[in-house]
Image: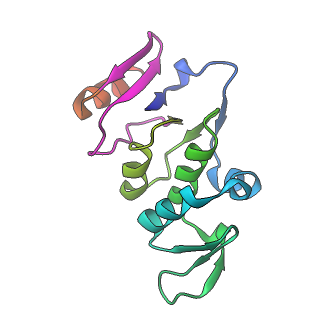
Amino acid sequence: MITVYKKKGIPKDLELIRVNDIYFNKYTAALLDEKAKQIIRKIDGSDMLDKFSIGSRFDGSKLNIDKLSTGCKTTLNVLYNPDKIFDIAECGDNALDVIYSLDNGKIYCDYPMISFDMDKVQVTGSDGPKVVDDYENLKEWWMDED
């Protein structure tokens, strides 16, 4: 289950990553394996050819893995680095749908970024952790935490 944080609820021992592109290019790209293929296909419509390249969804030409969208990179960051919190502000709906379906991971955003397909998440704010299983309740929590 994904854990959602607001600024007040971030533990001091967890690192918040706001620039997902750089973090992905520097750290996460080297961790990719078979799990990444489905996510890359679902979010960017591209095929992962090998660890460091994808096939363009437009013409199939070989591109460096750093050409993935920021939303796809963010999703992969969340999946492969469960010990860090990632800002989802630059994610589109397709990436949010995948992020909210992950079994594990930590996310942050200053404002509500919620998938309509969310099942349940753990939220951690000023009053500690709790599980939320409804879109409207999650949006309300997000707004009230400010």
Q: Nearer the viewer, residue 135 or 30?
A: 30
| Membership of 128 in magenta stretch | yes
**Residue shown at 27% from the left, 45% from the top:** 117
The percent position of residue 87, horizontal first and vertical second, equals 55, 41
Quarter placement of the N terminus? top left
**Residue shown at 25% from the left, 34% from the top:** 135
Q: Nearer the viewer, residue 49 or 127?
A: 49
**Residue shown at 76% from the left, 55% from the top:** 26
Q: Give above or below for 118 relative to 95.
A: above
Q: Is residue 39 left or right of residue 101?
A: right
Q: Which residues are magenta?
A: 108-132
Q: Give above or below for 67 relative to 55.
A: above
Quarter placement of the C terminus? top left
Q: Is residue 84 left or right of residue 42?
A: right
Q: Give above or below for 108 relative to 71.
A: above
The percent position of residue 17, horizontal first and vertical second, equals 65, 40
